[in-house]
């Protein structure tokens, strides 16, 4: 696919005209990152918007104790670091490629000029930002109010919903990354997985997850059941 075709396939840029897409293609910088390569660090100047074309990227922060908390894991088609584009601020977190990733970078100055000329682009970005704010609020609620077992149950159910209700699927991130996403440690996550298996809620073999009791997982996710 050409750069223009990739841009046209990005949900953020849906409903844009051919001329608007051409304008975006004129400012985009096509980048490739290797697995483990840092894309930006917390405190770096927010110089533009990133859109993941292929691969996987995690955005994360470190606690004062040095513990990693994954805020979000992005897949193809998703934009990230969009807030600093509007605010002109520094990046509030770190970003790292989890595998070889192709990323389109749109410099802030050129992108804001396009927004001024094409207000529909701003409306699309507002929709993305609103969705991201909702996800962040849900993450804060999970980390502050739910035990690790409840967070894990909610994640397992969410992934099932994303896969058309599949009761057996393969995790698309490592269990170490999943622990970081859930605000836990790999050791704690392993213990919780073991307890959930013993109670007949799931089976976990390597990256494969099999849901045995969806109703029980829902109870665990909302806090009406404990392990």
Image (cartoon, rainbow, N blue to C red):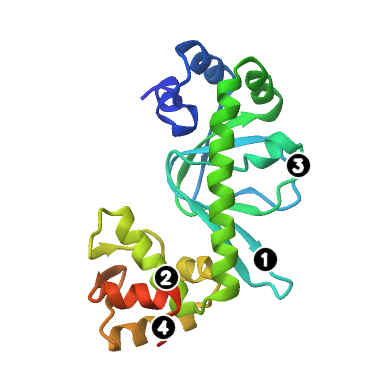
Residue at the disc numbered 3: 45
CA separation, marks 4 and 1? 23 Å
| Left or right: 104 as drawn, with respect to 203 | right
The label number, if any, that marks residue 62 in the structure image: 1
Look at the image and tell me whether residue 160 can be seen.
Answer: yes
- Coordinates of residue 125 in the picture (x, y in percent): 57, 33
Quick check: 139 above or below 12?
A: below
CA separation, marks 2 and 4? 12 Å
The label number, if any, that marks residue 175 in the structure image: 2
CA separation, marks 1 and 3? 18 Å
Mark whose residue sits in front, 3 or 4: 4
Mark 2 neighbour density, 10 Å: few (under 14) some (14–19) many (20 or more): some
Please report whichever mark, 1 or 2, sits nearer to the chain's N-terminal start: 1
Q: Are marks 2 and 4 in contact (CB under 8 Å)?
A: no
CA separation, marks 3 and 4? 39 Å
Look at the image and tell me whether residue 205 can be seen.
Answer: no
CA separation, marks 1 and 2? 18 Å
Q: Are marks 1 and 2 in contact (CB under 8 Å)?
A: no
Mark whose residue sits in front, 2 or 4: 4
Please report whichever mark, 1 or 3, sits nearer to the chain's N-terminal start: 3
Q: Residue at x 40, y 88 (%)?
A: 227
The picture quadrant where one finds residue 224 is bottom left
What SS does tag 2 mark? helix
The label number, if any, that marks residue 192 in the structure image: 4
- Coordinates of residue 59 in the picture (x, y in percent): 58, 54
Q: Residue at x 77, y 42 (%)?
A: 89
Q: Residue at x 45, y 47 (%)?
A: 100
Query: Is 33 or 187 nearer to us in this picture?
Result: 187
């Amino acid at each position: 696919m050409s750069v223009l075709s990739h841009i046209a396939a990005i949900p953020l840029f849906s409903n844009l005209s051919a001329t608007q897409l051409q304008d975006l293609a004129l400012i985009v910088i096509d980048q490739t990152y290797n697995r483990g390569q840092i894309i930006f660090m917390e405190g770096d100047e927010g110089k533009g918007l990133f859109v993941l074309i292929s691969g996987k990227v995690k955005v994360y922060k470190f606690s004062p104790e040095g513990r990693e908390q994954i805020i979000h894991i992005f897949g193809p088609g998703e934009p990230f670091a969009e807030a600093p584009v509007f605010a002109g601020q520094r990046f509030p977190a770190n970003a790292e490629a989890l595998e070889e990733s192709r990323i389109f970078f749109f410099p802030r100055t050129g992108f804001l000029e396009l927004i001024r000329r094409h207000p529909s682009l701003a409306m699309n970005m507002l929709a993305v930002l609103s969705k991201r704010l909702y996800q962040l609020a849900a993450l804060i609620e999970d980390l502050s109010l739910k035990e690790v077992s409840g967070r894990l149950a909610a994640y397992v159910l969410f992934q099932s919903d994303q896969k058309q209700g599949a009761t057996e699927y393969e995790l698309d991130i490592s269990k170490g990354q999943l622990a970081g996403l859930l605000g836990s440690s790999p050791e704690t996550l392993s213990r919780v997985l073991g307890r959930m298996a013993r109670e007949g809620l799931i089976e976990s073999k390597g990256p494969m997850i099999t849901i045995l009791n969806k109703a029980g997982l829902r109870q665990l996710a909302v806090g009406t059941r404990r392990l």
